[in-house]
Image (cartoon, coloured by chain):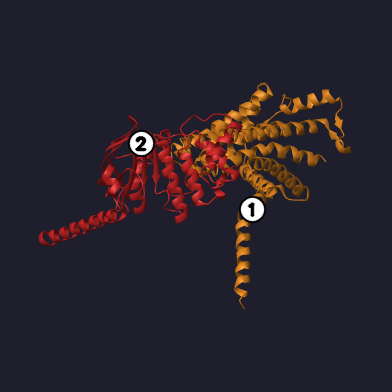
Chain colours: A red, B orange
Amino acid sequence: MLTTRRVYKTFNLGTPNEVRALRGVDLDVDEGSFVIVIGTNGSGKSTLLNAVAGGFPLDSGTLMLDGVDITRWPEHRRASMIGRVFQNPFSGTAPSMSIAQNLTLAARRGRSRGLGWALKRSMREELRDRVRRLNMRLEERLDNPIGSLSGGQRQALTLLMASWLKPKLLLLDEHTAALDPKSADQVIQLSEEIVARDRLTTLMVTHSMAQAAHLGDRLIMMHRGEVIHDFRGAEKQRLRASDLLNRFEDVRRAEQLDESAADMLRRLYV
Amino acid sequence: MLLLIGAFTIGLILSLLALGVFISFRIFEFPDITADGSITLGGAVTAVLLVAHLHPVVATAAAFFAGAIAGTTTGILHTRFKINGLLSGILVMTALYSVNLHIMGKSNLPLLSERTLASMAEASALSLLGTSVVHPLGWAVSTRDAAVLALALAAAAIVGLSLYLFFRTNLGTAMQAAGDNAQMIRALGVNVDHMIILGLAVSNGLIALAGGLLTQYQGFADVQMGIGMVVWGLASIIIGEALVGVRDLGFVITGAVMGSVLFRLIVALALRGGLNPNDLKLVTAGFVFLALVLPSLLQRARRTVRTLGTSEAPL
């Protein structure tokens, strides 16, 4: 479904703040696959999601989604195939507009928007129905501005909006990191339900090893802009949170080794 | 009485300006100074077309489209060429000064015996009522003034209602969302740049329409008529929000119209009361400044009072 080939991205090229965020990412995501992406800070996991969503142009490489080359598509055009939930609960909804208005905006994701009435009466029942399934009692507050809701409620609604029209690809970017534990659990559970029900092809970045071990049918670990581990099938199912922590520890040790080796070489030859 | 009717009429005409400023300043939080140039542009286009004996409706509609082109230019400068929003507006406003002079051919263009929307309203009112003085609520009002007031009221109502309905359509809600949270609406497949350009086009179209109507009301177009207009529009919106709050778009639109009228009434009374007309813009700017800083000042004062209260409580 999603194919990335030799994707490179460097930020602030040629400045002291140069960051080589993606260094040749090759990834093939099958249709209906739920892929968990983990990695250390600055490993490029969120950058990878942004690259797929179209937040910035690539330095090189290609992106294919559902057989279409989307490498040069602007962000808003890719939105016709991609649903997104952001880390910041405030990013995914328009705060001064009502719940119903936000949902009707999502109901036309990637479609043309003309002078047709946005909130048709026939639509209201469906809105109420789908919002009721969130079990947050928001169905009675459809006309309230979304800005008056909690982060967890807004994130649940963003999830609903991202999946309203079944997207080819769902991108979840640490979407529970900014929530309190209870809301985070609720949103994770909801994500799992929606992905399973609609069999959505999903990329989910997370910091939580528990989520990483528990969710998804495939897990990739990134480090310094590259995919360094890829667990699938039975191997993924066997993974425990402690295994993942050990892998991170390995990465850290290898890095220290690299540094001391470089140090030694410098002392010997410079 | 004449003063009151005049203030009402100008207030209603300039409520179109307030609604235009509402789109740029409130929906997009885009400080669009183009307004000062586009209101004059509307006046100039209308005046020239009327002098050329075109139908007043055509001349007025042309003002809207001319303003829309000005707004589109500002929008393109800002989105395509990444020029700061304020500067984009200043550039277009400055350029419009020359454009307006070229359109009019001189700095002031009077409408002497040309047929205007105002004269048409007067003529139809005269033939309808058959008298040159009407007596609403016992006051003697010339039919011409009453007819023009009715015309301005109709214009404000039609534009206000259209705007309200527009922001209930798929396109309108997308535009509103583009101003509210650009990242979100981009992720839902909307080109935010296009929304900004379209928004500024509609905004300046309405402002130019106000200019076209104002020109027909006062009987001339002047190249200086736009100076400070954007601040007047902003003042109207602020008054409107104080009157009705910011709960719902319908309220806000109605508030902007009411604010514009109230603002003109205050101005008329202040001038009557001896305010030097030369000080008008200074006073208006001071008013807008106060309206902008007063809420946060009040909040700080309230917080100070509260902390004083709590720090004293344990004693």
Circle nearer the viewer, 2 or 1 = 2
Give the quadrant of the C terminus of chain A: bottom left
Q: Which mark is residue B291?
A: 1
Could one spot residue B132 in this view of the protein?
A: yes
- Give me the chain letter of mark 1: B
Nearer to the camera, B77 or B252 = B252
For residue A98, side relative to residue A244 (left or right) = right
Residue A81 at x, y percent in the picture: 41, 33
Q: Is residue B263 above or below residue A257?
A: above
Residue under label 2: A32
At 72% from the left and 50% from the top, the residue drawn is B276
Label 1: which secondary element: helix
- Hey, what amino acid is under mark 2? Gly
- Give me the chain letter of mark 2: A
Could one spot residue B98 in this view of the protein?
A: no
Residue B85 at x, y percent in the picture: 50, 43
Nearer to the camera, B238 or A10 = A10
Residue A209 at x, y percent in the picture: 34, 53
Q: Residue furthest bottom?
A: B315
Label 2: which secondary element: loop
For residue B156, side relative to residue B105 (left or right) = right
Q: Quadrant of residue A217?
A: top left
Q: Is residue B206 above or below residue B314?
A: above
Residue B96 at x, y percent in the picture: 55, 35
Total marks drawn?
Answer: 2
At 53% from the left and 46% from the top, the residue drawn is A135
User: Marks 1 and 2: in contact by CB < 8 Å?
Assistant: no
Q: Do circles 2 and 1 both sit on a common chain?
A: no
Nearer to the camera, A191 or B84 = A191
- Hey, what amino acid is under mark 1? Ala
